[in-house]
Amino acid sequence: MPTPRPELLIEMQRRMWRVRAFDERAVELRHAREIHGPVHPSIGQEAACVGACMALREDDTLTGNHRSHGHPIAKGSELGPLMAELLGKATGVCGGMGGSMHLADFSVGSLGETGIVGAGIPIAVGAGLSARVRGTDQICIAFFGDGASNHGTFHESLNLAAIWKLPVLFFCENNGYAATTSLARATSVEDVAERAAGYRMPGVVVDGQDAVAVYEVTAEAAARARAGEGPSLLEAKTYRYLEHAEGEGIPGFYRDAAEIERWRQRDPLEIHRQLLLDRNLLDAAGADRIEREARAEVDAALAFARESAEPEPRAAFDVVFANSGGSGT
Amino acid sequence: MPTPRPELLIEMQRRMWRVRAFDERAVELRHAREIHGPVHPSIGQEAACVGACMALREDDTLTGNHRSHGHPIAKGSELGPLMAELLGKATGVCGGMGGSMHLADFSVGSLGETGIVGAGIPIAVGAGLSARVRGTDQICIAFFGDGASNHGTFHESLNLAAIWKLPVLFFCENNGYAATTSLARATSVEDVAERAAGYRMPGVVVDGQDAVAVYEVTAEAAARARAGEGPSLLEAKTYRYLEHAEGEGIPGFYRDAAEIERWRQRDPLEIHRQLLLDRNLLDAAGADRIEREARAEVDAALAFARESAEPEPRAAFDVVFANSGGSGT
Amino acid sequence: MSETRELSYAEAIHEAQILEMGRDASVILIGEDIHGLTLGPYAEFGPERLWSAPISESGFTGMAVGAALTGLRPIVDLLISSLLYVAMDPLVNQAGKLRAMTGGQAKVPAVFRCGLWHGSSYAAQHSDRPYPLFMNSPGLKVAIPATPADAKGLLQTAVRDDDPVMIFEDRNLAHERGPVCEGDAPVPFGQARVHREGSDVTLVAIASAVREALAAADDLAREGISVEVIDPRTLVPLDRETLLGSVRRTGRLVVADPAHRTCGAAAEIAALAAEEAFDALRAPVARVTTPDVPIPFSPALESKLYPSQQGIADAVRRVARY
Amino acid sequence: MSETRELSYAEAIHEAQILEMGRDASVILIGEDIHGLTLGPYAEFGPERLWSAPISESGFTGMAVGAALTGLRPIVDLLISSLLYVAMDPLVNQAGKLRAMTGGQAKVPAVFRCGLWHGSSYAAQHSDRPYPLFMNSPGLKVAIPATPADAKGLLQTAVRDDDPVMIFEDRNLAHERGPVCEGDAPVPFGQARVHREGSDVTLVAIASAVREALAAADDLAREGISVEVIDPRTLVPLDRETLLGSVRRTGRLVVADPAHRTCGAAAEIAALAAEEAFDALRAPVARVTTPDVPIPFSPALESKLYPSQQGIADAVRRVARY
Ligand SMILES: Cc1ncc(C[n+]2csc(CCOP(=O)(O)OP(=O)(O)O)c2C)c(N)n1
Ligand SMILES: Cc1ncc(C[n+]2csc(CCOP(=O)(O)OP(=O)(O)O)c2C)c(N)n1
Ligand SMILES: [Mg+2]
Ligand SMILES: [Mg+2]
């Protein structure tokens, strides 16, 4: 197993804190109605985002889903343009056109989230195909949920990548629920990774609260993909602490407080902090500083976002086509 | 294993001959341009159609695909209205609206073929759900090809039927090719039945040239489904002797004559004839008579079809809606 | 006529569903995350009437078609109209065509409830109003209620209809309240509702544009422009007589339609007028629609795109003064 | 101007593909059963340029989008337009919207070749002409060639365009022959082709209706009716200037369009005329389209449904004599 170097272990904690602090703030802003539209926080799932993305190369690409603030952050995005996007500002990474469900940051290889469950998976297959045809050794990782594994695109994509041995990682963040629907209610298997057998590709279950474990299986699968040995299906067992989408009034009847509490006991930031302390890579003050710095970055991002201008009305019309002509009237 | 009774064994041969004779005639008519549009013959695959359908009850239902003349015949359809349908006549089972790719005969539980690969599979799941809700113990069988198993609807349907234990049989007629594309080129597994594991349902491979073997596995799966124990994925290894669609000028480069010849050596009608002779259920003359009678039935069906009138132009408009209003102009 | 009470549009929809499920045991519900309903007034129907489905829209929409072919009357909750693309084949190629393809052997009495979410920063992939796509796809009926009474009545009719019905529910109207009859109150298909009579301009409005159109008509009345506001309520079948009759009287037509402009419902109604009421027309037809751009996230951008009271009033003024 | 030769519509399409693949190594082909092409003139491009795919239209269409986002220019052969419903999400929600959603970061230079098979007893599930659905879905360009020259030229332009282009190829024209330039001969988008000038009636025709329209125009000329026949060639972007300019001159408009009637391309063009050329119109607009019925199998039924020379001529006569 490729184990991360010390600096990387520290950087992991930093990025996890960025994700956590960013999403905590996003949730507040949503409740305060400073953010409009749905916000799907990744809080509780940071180790999956960060462990996976940090096992990739800078020029590798990713596709996300509706719950994807964490993925570009984990891949190294600047927070300012992301936060400005959530606020719908002209300086947003998508100029205010995308919002929370459609962040994309091509500068770090984030090809875009999709609000359509399962739809990002074939797009990742295409990015893998493209790397192959263009003769690079990039790989692409598709992030999706347990719910998405019941979608037809999951099946078609795994088959496509398998028959052509494309450099694609299928990364399932299994948080146990699709909105209010538990995995058991909707899914014919207990581990999504079982489905890998139908495509004769490796199917790996990993502790999604342990960033290092996630890093290791991802790095291994990435090396395999890069070497032309084909795709893998990785499944991180994780959990979201908050609601499916915050501030939408979704009832919480479908799970009990004890379950949430049990998972909070295995908080990815705590687990990784302990690892850093145990290995003497940081002392408590150093670990606290990482959190503080991340929060400060988020504050700065928010200040930037708030100061930024609203987009000009014409913006919606100007981005429809790359080659002009035929846009809306 | 539930083994078929003697009369049933003889009836199997009769129905296989009906399918064979019907399709041989359909191919001739297609080449003579008396039939318009694509014709996908089931010649070579008769044991799969007949073995499966005869293991069902009269009130069980089925959905087909583009290659589905054989399914309603195997389920007991009258040949006249089927042949008249291929000729686009008013007396056709679908009044000339459906044609070869869209035969449906509700009188025998044939809910309709679909020209869209994979699309009949979820419809069968719905028929199974309906039987369950209405409190009957009917089951529904979905026929589809190896190619269809790469479609998203396959995955979604198997998952749906599995989680709810619906009385549905997924019956794959694996003839090794999807049009000109071999299974190996398009499919991540060797046996489509391997994919059953992803839905935790039984996946059974059967010799598709042996009607009795097909009957037996189908009857067993049907009993399971009827008892509320859930769906099965059955895979019959079979072969089509003729082209994907006859008369369309599809090139034959993708397989060699030796392969076709090898399969012709395992002709389902020959295999079953031998069984009937071996068990002294028929003598050679009796076996020949079955063939002759089937051919005569097809001739009569064709005579009926040829004598029948063309549909009235208004027919296309009258069948759009069941509750009038809003039809085409 | 039975008693009426005030209900919201969303409440009216539930009332229709519950009434129809109570009336006819073959009515079932299929949709994602609907298991929660069993905690409420749907509990009485038991688990075999409520199928809370995985994220497999193509699969369970096709499943609904199969159920409808074999004796059930499924109501499928497709949540968000922008998800319909995932289920287009079972809708367009199966539900819409099976009756015709089978020469009338099949009937497909299924209802597809499709929420129109727009104007709430749901952004490009959750804000579509794709009913024109289904108007161009034969075999499907298309209903769009704009009031609580129509939300209930059209849904009741849809459930009882033997054909597949796509019913587009404008979520911007979810909390609008209005009088709704108690008990059975089906609204016939193919009959437009004349919300307001007028003599100067015919204003056809669809979905939440009806609300904007009525507000615009109030303003315009004060300016001396008499506007007839008509909601077709079903786009397939379309009540051509009422629409064209009005245009023949007023000689002027404005269509306010939240769908995208090109090949939208407004295009169809405008074309009909240009074909069938040409002699009466005294001014160009005007369409007030959503421009052909993917819907932006930013409220600053999105809020300007849909037919508004202001935009509709401007169009009517232009046409009236022509 | 380079040399021309006679090619068939189908040959012209292959010529365009081969030229573009030769010109630009980022052009790849994706489609079912295309591995056979490697036996022919495509062999030189090698296996990495031709992806013969499983029956997974949604998967490989989405895959094409991902490839287009990351530096390739895929041409996707979607065979039969009636299969598009299976791939609607990657087309409408992804290809059409990603550029806008990402604020212009993405470009999606993919071409989707969609065969229009109708009039050959392919029946309801293989005979659709669904381009109006994509005209109502912003972010997609829509081209429909009616001649061999346009089949080549529009496809060349489509490949070079940085936006997703749906190109609908009318298979009824596959064996029609006509002059085609050697070498590069891209046809610009948004420029209608005036096939024939005339002064009495503007006849806008799409796909195989162009052939019928030109034949009708010949007949009508003998009767003294001078018909201007225009093929928009791209429906998005639409050359409004040429269309409306013609209507303003002739005062009369007939649109012949093989799509279904309601919310079809003809509806859009008729609506445009009623909005923008109203003063010039001297007769009702007429649409000659396919009625809103699932396409029947029986030749006796199917053959009567599409715009024919006869049906078009009748409509023009009605309008001309109005
Ligand atoms: C195709 C589609 N169906 C339904 C929805 C509505 N929806 C959005 S997120 C979601 C649940 C997704 O669950 P999962 O894939 O497990 O991801 P998670 O939210 O748990 O991260 C649903 C049903 C959608 N956006 N797209
Ligand atoms: C969704 C869809 N894609 C493609 C086609 C074109 N097509 C018709 S049959 C066929 C091959 C089907 O192969 P398989 O499922 O193995 O059935 P078989 O023909 O071998 O019986 C294809 C590609 C179609 N009709 N529908
Ligand atoms: Mg989940
Ligand atoms: Mg096959």
Image (cartoon, coloured by chain):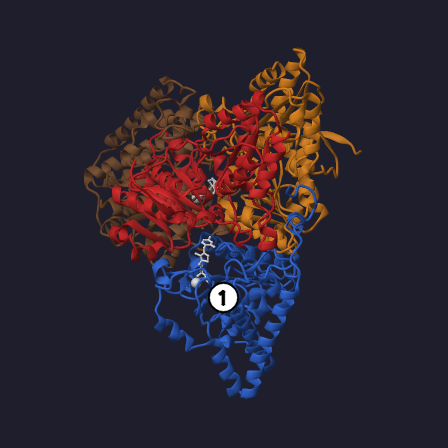
Chain colours: A brown, B blue, C orange, D red
The crowd level at tag 1 (other Cα within 10 Å; few <14, some 14-19, many 20+) is many
Which image quarter holds the C terminus of chain B?
Answer: top right
* Place of residue B300 in the rendered image (x, y in percent of width and height, measured from the top left): 63, 72
* Place of residue B109 in the rendered image (x, y in percent of width and height, measured from the top left): 62, 63
Q: Which residue is mark 1?
A: B41
Q: Is residue A248 visible?
A: yes
* Place of residue C277 in the rendered image (x, y in percent of width and height, measured from the top left): 66, 28
Helix, strand or loop status at disc 1? loop
Q: Residue at x 40, y 53 (%)?
A: A191
Q: Is residue C98 above or below residue B275?
A: above
Output the chain of dot 1.
B
Q: Is residue C175 above or below residue D169?
A: above
* Place of residue D272 in the rendered image (x, y in percent of width and height, measured from the top left): 53, 27
Residue type at mark 1 is Pro
Q: Residue at x 50, y 77 (%)?
A: B269
Q: Say left or right for B321 vs B17.
A: right
**Ligand 3 sits in which quadrant?**
top left
